[in-house]
Amino acid sequence: MDDEDFVLEITREMIESLGYTVIARTGSLEALNVFRANPERFDLIISDQMMPNMTGQELALNIRAINPRTPFILCTGFSTCVAEEKGANSGIAAFVYKPLHRQGLAETIRRILDKQT
């Protein structure tokens, strides 16, 4: 999830090229509603921190309330905007920093998904 269409599309293509199925949304409230409708459909959530209506960290708390087993990766361009210790308390499994790079994102996704099995 990212509120910028261009960033969302590039990220979606990057993740799909790794062999994953992606459901992409530009709004945090819309994404939460899609998740709420069928939480078992999702193996992982990736969101930008700076979103309108609800930050990525707030979304992580909401996701965790619905299904605490769903891992959450938070993307940010500002390493100081969310302390990693506080993020862990929100249910954030990992942080990735912008600009996103395919290799680093791939390794993070795989590491988080491997912990789930």
Image: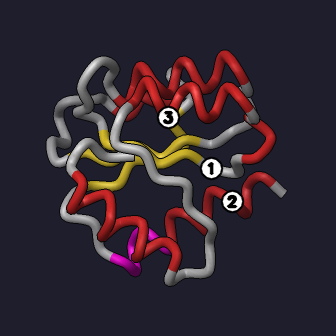
Q: Is residue 35 above or below residue 5?
A: above
Residue type at numbered disc 3: Ala
Q: In this view, does 59 lie above or below 98?
A: above
Q: In this view, does 106 lie above or below 94?
A: below
Of the image marks 3 and 1, the number of the one nearer the N terminus: 3
Residue type at numbered disc 1: Leu
Q: Which residue is depicted at the point 52% across and 75% down?
A: 16
The reply to whether the C-beta atoms of the residues labelled 2 and 1 are less than 8 Å apart is: yes
Q: Which residue is depicted at the point 67% across and 26% down?
A: 36
Along the viewing direction, whichever of 25 and 64 lies nearer the viewer:
25
Residue 107 seen from this side? yes
Q: Which residue is depicted at the point 26% across and 31% down?
A: 51
Question: Distance between the Cα atoms at labels 3 and 1?
Answer: 13 Å
Front position among marks 3 and 2: 3
Q: How far from the left and from the top, in percent, is residue 2? A: 31, 46
Find residue 113 and name its label.
2
The boundaries of the magenta stretch are 102-106
Residue type at numbered disc 2: Leu
Q: How far from the left and from the top, in percent, is residue 78? A: 15, 42
Find residue 31 and name its label.
3
Mark 1 secondary-structure assignment: loop
